[in-house]
Amino acid sequence: MFLKALRRRKPIVDLLRETQGQKGGLSRSLGVMDIILYGVGSSVGAGIYSLIGVGAKEAGPAISLSFLFCGLACIFTSLSYSEFAARVPVAGSAYTFVYASFGEFAAWLVGWNLTLGYGVSAAVIARSWAEYLSNFISDSGQEVPSYFTKLDIEGVECNPLSVVIIMACTLVLCLGVKESTKFNAAMTVLNLLVLTYVLFAGSPEVNEESLEPFAPKGVKGVAKGAGLVFFAYLGFDMVACLSEEVKDPQKNMPVGIIGSLLVSMSIYVSLSVVIVGMAPMELLGSLTPISNAFKANGCCTIEEMAADVASYDDDASYQCLSCKGDDVVSSALWYGSKVINFGALFGLTTACFTCQMGQPRIFYRMAKDGLLFSKFGEVSQSSMVPLFGTIMTGIMVSSLAFAVDLESLANMISLGTLQVFTFVNAGVIILRTSRPDVSATKVPALLVIFCACIFLASLSISTSWVKGLLFFVPFLLVGGAVICTAVLMSVPRARPPNSFKCPFVPVVPLLGIACNVYMMGSFDKTAWIDIGAWLGAGILIYFGYGIWNSTLRDTNEFLLGRDVTGG
């Protein structure tokens, strides 16, 4: 009975019934352009203004290929998301989708990873926002006291300034969805204007020397870079979180999810080529790569940049990043770095804002299912938002932002996001093969074998443990994945949904799974230990509270007990 509780699923018809005619629920007030701007605002923030520098340390100038690989992987996943979001237009995003396909325990773990993707990401982004604000103020001739961004508390470097943006976003979110939508649209448009300037002003400064060697660590470096920056594509999951607040979701959700992804991918790939081509990797840094690229070109020639990197002393700063107005080579680019520092505030604000908007919706859906305290499931009658969850998210993110390191968390957040996307892809296959004449364990078992083959193939390539006579091992593992694909294609299908359908099931979802799992294999042991500890904490909470308070506790909605594909 205990194992059945872990596998109990909520049928789609029940999920839809809960949102129809309910009092005190979320209001459907968002159009397709609103959700596209939410998706772009969520994605094009930390990924552009911070993660280019972080990912380039592994991929080199080929970070553009890392962003492209992530984008292509996400296209497959976005099609699975679109089917779910149109079929189950309920708040909760991947958590809700997995609840309907895999069951309660898997859904809880996915929801817990989404907390990592939203709540912790918001804290990371807030730290980057504080860094850009500090740089902008310093460039204006005023010095920011060090204790605002680097306050040492018992050996921990804390950042009080990052709390400011979190509290501001929390306040706007508490006002309501309409006010939040206007705020996000304004910030996103301003951010896109700044990025357009970066593209056109930076393109002429791209030089071959900065792009060589293009991929210093080869395919392994590109794959690892892709893993580092993957959580930058979380935006279309944010769109899915808003399903319960979108008008005509069967039509608008697929457009919003796929549209926001394509816009974000185009921005990432084009801008990453420009930024890494403007200056050596060392000058870009991890926190402010775009403004550093412009400042370096404003202060120095290509030859001077190379000499500065070669003669760098750990006890000093780069000369090409510390020149004053009288010493510049290009005034336009030097002043451009100031514009970018200011413009980055808009992009990072929208990214932080949308992360904080998505997190309470996850809490809201979990509370409605009984897996979290009921207070998180209450909606304010005046603002029509989950007020308690929004405030608690603000408090949680503020606390985390006080002491968060971007590079140490980027791996864990991306790994958690990859796991979420893998479950969503697999969930589409589960629902499409949910029939009385198909064994309930056959398809999940094949999916596990498929994932294991791809993961081991990735691991063997990234760790180089298949040298010599074992060079053929990855090919055998890929062959095993192909066999699993063939068997899955032969499984009888259930009736497809009347709304948007992911094409070529199971091939498209399996391609999404393969891309996601391959990137998982590129992560180092530390990232897996971190995500294991995070999931372990989530499991303790589930067994301590969720499993005993689930709304399905006294029902028989188990994996083997009822058709869940209705609706």
Image (cartoon, rainbow, N blue to C red):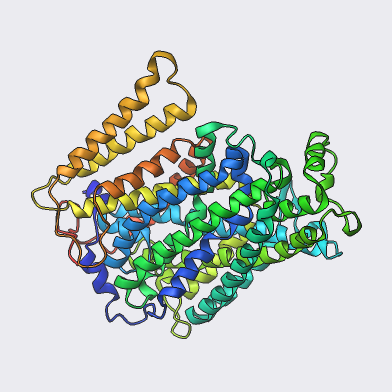
Q: Quadrant of residue 459?
A: top left
User: As drawn, which residue projects farthest toward the top?
Assistant: 469
Residue visible at 50% across and 57% down? 266
In the image: residue 142, left or right of residue 226 = right
User: As drawn, which residue projects farthest toward the right?
Assistant: 326
Q: Position of residue 377 (x, y in %)?
A: 40, 71
Q: Position of residue 296 (x, y in %)?
A: 77, 50
Compared to residue 482, the image places residue 236 above or below, namely: below
In the image: residue 4, left or right of residue 55 = left
Q: Please indicate, yes or no, whether residue 35 appears anywhere in the rendered image.
A: yes
Compared to residue 458, the image places residue 34 above or below, namely: below
Q: Position of residue 133 (x, y in %)?
A: 73, 63
Residue visible at 37% across and 57% down? 78
Between 424 and 506, the one lying in front of the other is: 506
Q: Please indicate, yes or no, whether residue 160 appears anywhere in the rendered image.
A: no
User: As drawn, which residue projects farthest toward the bottom?
Assistant: 382
In the image: residue 486, left or right of residue 322 = left
Give the number of callouts.
Answer: 0
Q: Quadrant of residue 245?
A: bottom left
Quarter occupied by the C terminus: bottom left
Residue visible at 36% across and 58% down? 95
User: As drawn, which residue projects farthest toward the left?
Assistant: 437
Q: Position of residue 65 (x, y in %)?
A: 52, 44
